[in-house]
């Protein structure tokens, strides 16, 4: 069972957009409000474990680039585990995380 709420702000002063992805048995169900529930579910099923629950490892070197002011917070449950994960576009590593989960965050990878 997947039940995730996505809170997205395009800019700190912008209105918050709230989406939801609910899936059971590998299929989105009616409560899902993300723009493309199938694509969002595919991204979550493929990358959710490593994005939401990353394994500790050596420090990463991230390119110092700015991808925009967007911020998203994903909370809820993923296969029985609690999720509370923040996304931004503040450097190369964060932009990569954002692009990986773009269908869940309400858009397409850029």
Image: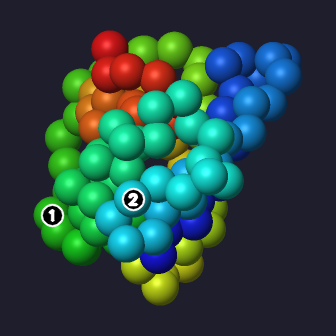
Front one among 13 and 99: 99
Classify residue 91 by image quadrant: top left
**In the image, residue 38 above or below residue 4:** above
Q: Quadrant of the C terminus?
A: top left
Rendered residue at 48%/62% (across/down):
23
Rendered residue at 19%/49% (across/down):
60
Separation of residues labelled 1 and 2 (CA atoms): 35 Å
Q: Which residue in the structure is indicated by mark 1? A: 58
**In the image, residue 63 above or below residue 62:** above
In the drawing, does residue 63 fall left or right of residue 77? left
Place of residue 5 in the rendered image (x, y in percent of width and height, measured from the top left): 65, 54
Query: How is this picture coloured?
Result: rainbow
Place of residue 98 in the rendered image (x, y in percent of width and height, measured from the top left): 39, 34
Question: Of marks 1 and 2, which one's residue comes earlier in the chain?
Answer: 2
Query: Is label 1 in a helix, a strand or a loop?
Result: loop
Q: Which residue in the structure is indicated by mark 2? A: 27
In the drawing, does residue 71 fall left or right of residue 59? right
Residue 54 visible from this viewpoint:
no
Query: Is label 2 in a helix, a strand or a loop?
Result: strand
Answer few, some or many: residues within 10 Å of disc 1's Cα (few below 14, many 20 plus, some between 14 and 19).
Answer: few
Answer few, some or many: residues within 10 Å of disc 2's Cα (few below 14, many 20 plus, some between 14 and 19).
Answer: some
Work out which residue is located at the far bottom of the displayed protein and give it. Answer: 80
Classify residue 16 by image quadrant: top right
**In the image, residue 29 above or below residue 39:** below
Classify residue 72 by image quadrant: top right
Rendered residue at 74%/31% (across/down):
17
Residue 55 visible from this viewpoint:
yes
Rendered residue at 54%/57% (across/down):
29
Place of residue 107 in the rendered image (x, y in percent of width and height, measured from the top left): 46, 23
Q: Nearer the viewer, mark 1 or mark 2?
A: 2
**In the image, residue 24 above or below residue 19:** below
In the drawing, does residue 77 fall left or right of residue 26? right
């Amino acid at each position: 069972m997947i039940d995730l709420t996505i809170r997205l702000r395009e800019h700190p002063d912008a209105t918050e957009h709230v989406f939801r992805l609910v899936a059971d048995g590998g299929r989105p169900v009616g409560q899902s409000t993300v723009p493309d529930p199938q694509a969002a579910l595919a991204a979550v099923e493929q990358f959710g474990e490593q994005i939401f629950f990353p394994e500790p490892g050596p420090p990463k070197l991230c390119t110092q680039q700015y991808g925009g002011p967007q911020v998203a917070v994903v909370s809820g449950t993923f296969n029985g585990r609690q999720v509370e994960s923040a996304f931004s576009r503040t450097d190369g590593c964060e932009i990569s995380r954002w692009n990986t989960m773009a269908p869940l965050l309400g858009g397409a990878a850029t």
